[in-house]
Amino acid sequence: MIFKQLFDTKSSTYTYLISSGNGREALIIDPVLENVNEYIYILKELDLKLVKVIDTHIHADHVTGASKLKNITKCSTIMGNHTPAESVEIKVKDDEYINLDNIKIRAMYTPGHTSDSYSFLMNNYLFSGDTLLINGTGRTDFQNGNAKDAYNSIFNKLLKLPDETLLYPAHDYKGEKVSTIGKERKQNPRLQVNSVDEYVEIMNNLNIKKPSELEFNVSRNINLGA
Ligand code: FE
């Protein structure tokens, strides 16, 4: 299998490139518009055919490269079916599988950070978007975010996965690249709560500033960055 974790320094976004092998189909999760040329270069180097691109949710902190990649490679665009982005071609449902040659990727509806947030599970690789981060969790204070939903998505869905599941989030601001579900359950400070109310209390009092260009990014991303 080919697996590449790429990083956008401006927005601290992780983008993932997956393929079963050289000369085969590829999929990209959470591409960043400014880095599309880099993805195209890697695809060419590895002789891969990009067939699918996924956005885990409508991002507020960067513009997606989905439309640009589609224009260049004719790949299909995928999001969860709660997305407000009408031009998405394939809208997957909770528990639906996405195929990539012999690889199967399960879509999991994990609202809370936004109402359209999905996570994607490929074998023991979990791409959690901004639902679950390393030592953190995605904020819930805009884009129909909801701390109670986030608690439910994290505790009743993602943390039910086996301990050894590898956690690959959409962002990290401290240089962490990967964790596991077991490690996060034990050590993630946001997850050391005894009740949903306690979690909601924490999330509703974070007082963090909004990303710059939030409105611009969201409005671009509703059109997949076109
Ligand atoms: Fe986000």
Image: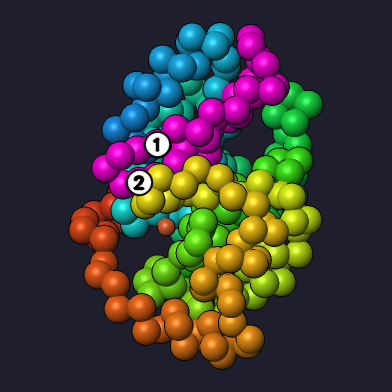
Dominant secondary structure of the magenta stretch?
Answer: strand
In the image, ligand 1 is in what quadrant? bottom left
Magenta region:
1-29
Quarter in which the C terminus is drawn: top left
What type is the residue that disc 1 sits on?
Phe
Q: Position of residue 67 (x, y in %)?
A: 40, 35
Q: Residues within 10 Å of mark 1 (few under 14, many from 20)?
A: many
- Using the image, determine if residue 7 lies above or below residue 137: above
Q: Would you say residue 65 sits in the magenta stretch?
A: no
Q: Mark yes or no: residue 202 visible.
A: yes
In the depicted view, which residue is nearer to us: 131 or 36?
Answer: 131
Q: Which structural element holds mark 2?
A: loop
- Residue 59 in the figure: left or right of residue 181: left
Image-quadrant location for residue 197: bottom right
Q: Would you say residue 27 sits in the magenta stretch?
A: yes
Which circle marks residue 12 in the picture? 2
**Does ligand 1 reach within 8 Å of label 2's beta carbon?**
no
- Using the image, determine if residue 152 lies above or below residue 46: below
